[in-house]
Image: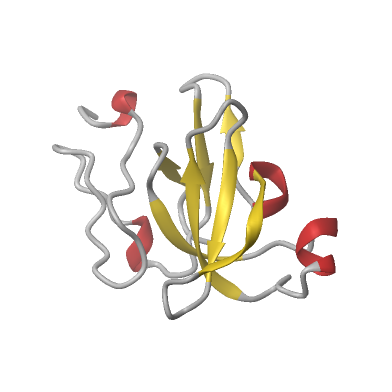
């Protein structure tokens, strides 16, 4: 498994969807899809088809495979490839040109 990748609202990442009740119902459990962390009153996750179009309605973060870190107060996930776990520790920017757009490390991890 890759290292956890910390996300901010608006970040997208390629990940294998969990076998949660919602993902199983939507028949996407175990599939690799692009998922965006949405900034709403209650954080949600939007799934995307490979062509970039939205897949269904947003689902809860937990059902999509995003987890909450109480210490950093941010969501994290486990990306679908090893490259996605590589984050520039100086800037916090994520550099996978294929799988994610702008995911970042938590502020506490930037200066380690």
Report the colour scheme: secondary structure
**Measured along the vertical axis of the image, is residue 56 above or below residue 87?**
below
Residue shown at 38% from the left, 44% from the top: 10
Residue 112's place in the image compared with 35, above or below, is above
- Location of residue 91 with respect to 87 vertically, above or below: above
Q: Nearer the viewer, residue 34 or 42?
A: 42
Image coordinates for residue 12, horizontal then vertical, percent: 40, 55
Q: Position of residue 83 (x, y in %)?
A: 33, 67
Question: What x and y, as percent, mark residue 57?
Answer: 65, 56
Q: Looking at the image, which is closer to me, 85 or 51?
A: 51
Residue drawn at (60%, 41%) of the image: 44
Q: Which residue is rendered at x = 22% and y = 46% of the image?
A: 93
Above or below for 110 versus 35: above
Furthest toward the left, the residue is 90
Quadrant housing residue 108: top left
Q: Quadrant of the C terminus?
A: top left
Which one is in front, 96 or 28? 28
Horizontal relation, residue 5 to residue 44: left or right? left
Name the quadrant of the N terminus.
bottom right
Horizontal arrangement in the rendering, residue 110 relative to residue 16 (left or right) = left
Horizontal and vertical percent position of residue 30: 69, 73
């Amino acid at each position: 498994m890759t290292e956890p990748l910390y996300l901010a609202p608006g970040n997208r990442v390629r990940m294998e969807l969990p076998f949660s009740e919602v993902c199983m119902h939507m028949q996407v459990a175990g599939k690799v899809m692009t998922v965006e962390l949405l900034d709403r009153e209650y954080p949600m996750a939007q799934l995307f088809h490979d062509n970039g179009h939205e897949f269904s309605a947003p689902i809860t973060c937990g059902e999509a495979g995003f987890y909450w870190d109480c210490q950093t107060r941010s969501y994290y996930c486990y990306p679908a490839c090893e490259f996605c776990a590589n984050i520039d520790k100086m800037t916090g920017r994520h550099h996978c040109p294929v799988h994610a757009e702008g995911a970042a490390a938590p502020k506490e991890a930037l200066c380690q």
